[in-house]
Amino acid sequence: NHALQHKFHIPIVHNRYSNNKKQHTVPMVKYAAIATLLLLACNNASAFVPSASQNVRNSGMTKMSVLTERQMQFWEDVEDGLNNVALVFKENNLDIDRIRNFAQTAQGINPLPVPELPGHQPSEEHVDGLTAKPFWDVAANSEQFPWAQKLEANSHIIIEELQAKLDREALEQSLFAGDSAWQNNVMGAGWSAFRLQRLGVWNGENCKEFPKTTELMRSLNIPFAVRGVCFARQAAGSGVQPHTDGRNFILTSHVGLKVPEGCWIKVGEEERTWEEGKLVTLDTSFEHSTGNPTEADRHVLIIDFWHPELTVAERAALEFVYDLRNKFESGQVAIRKPKRLMEEEEGQGLAGLFSGFSGLFGGEKNEEK
């Protein structure tokens, strides 16, 4: 992740386990094709989540042995990367112990976190010790969220730019068509999005459609998290069923842009509505759902950002993990045998060698013993 390495001055992680220098000259296209086929062929293709069954994971009994070779490779690379992040921030006395625990939980080594409130559904993607509550009033807390009041004060820029864009495309209805088909299984057919930023990368073509909004977003120093920034539409007469992503270290703000009266959002056991030009902020590790029972579309701007109780070192570590995950799951990382398996095979080979020697030096007596 050269962008992250440049941003946080993290040295590049090299593959220490291959002695074949020619391996690195094979075109990445070949690796990507092989990895993609592998990922498509496996039900447990995710580099991130253990392949154990849900009931075993809920019992806290998941072990490293349930990981696929690809997942083992991923977590070995994560460990190397986290070691480098730790070195960068060591001189500032900032540790990443909680992110190391996060990695242990995500692999199924640690037990799953316990819900803290009704409706809370934390997953294996969990950072210990963070405040959990369904809604956050970010505009009222300038110390933790210094950007929130400025965003609300300038929300008219976003509202006006969106309305102008909708007016221009009133006949085509194409603005929200391209980014959200893959999310329909979770969000429902009535929900669609137009993404400006994801995984720290701004979508240049999409940002050209909303230059003022993009400029405003980039000027506020919001600590954007991995899911980024997008416009979201909830079609008239539709809703999003209760769901959760389980990640307790990301908060999500919605800027109300076009909100017909009667629209609602429920997080945990609490229900609210949006107000145009104002922020509604939720913790998506709580079960949440939305509804638009009206005859007009509802529009908000969604902004994902890091939980304020994460340190800068922990943010850098999580950015590394999720960027690496994206590269693994999109086939951008070459396949290699995990170090653990290589060491086991080397051990078996040595055991066979020693067994052969034992026949020369009284092996039969040893076997009798």
Image (cartoon, rainbow, N blue to C red):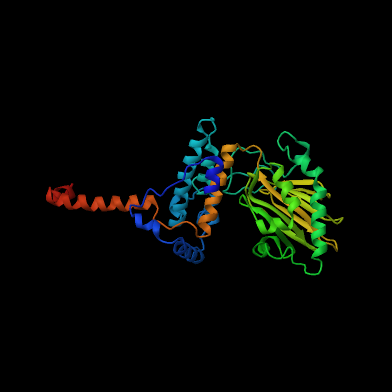
As drawn, the residue found furthest toward the right would be: 261
Q: Nearer the viewer, residue 49 or 361?
A: 49
Q: How many marks?
A: 0
Q: Nearer the viewer, residue 272 or 56?
A: 272
The percent position of residue 12, horizontal first and vertical second, equals 46, 45
Please report the residue visible at 77 percent of the width from the left and 49 percent of the height from the top.
Answer: 255
Q: Can residue 43 be seen in this view?
A: yes
Q: Seen in the image, is 352 located left or right of residue 195?
A: left
Q: Nearer the viewer, residue 4 or 72?
A: 4
Please report the residue visible at 44 percent of the width from the left and 64 percent of the height from the top.
Answer: 30
Q: Seen in the image, is 193 located left or right of residue 330?
A: right
Residue 138: name its quadrant: top right
Give the answer, above or below, for where 320 lies relative to 32: above
Q: Is residue 242 visible?
A: no
Give the answer, above or below, for where 15 lies relative to 36: above
The percent position of residue 105, horizontal first and vertical second, equals 53, 46
The percent position of residue 20, horizontal first and vertical second, equals 33, 55
Please report the residue visible at 56 percent of the width from the left and 42 percent of the height from the top.
Answer: 7
Q: Seen in the image, is 136 located left or right of residue 259?
A: left
The percent position of residue 205, horizontal first and vertical second, equals 67, 59
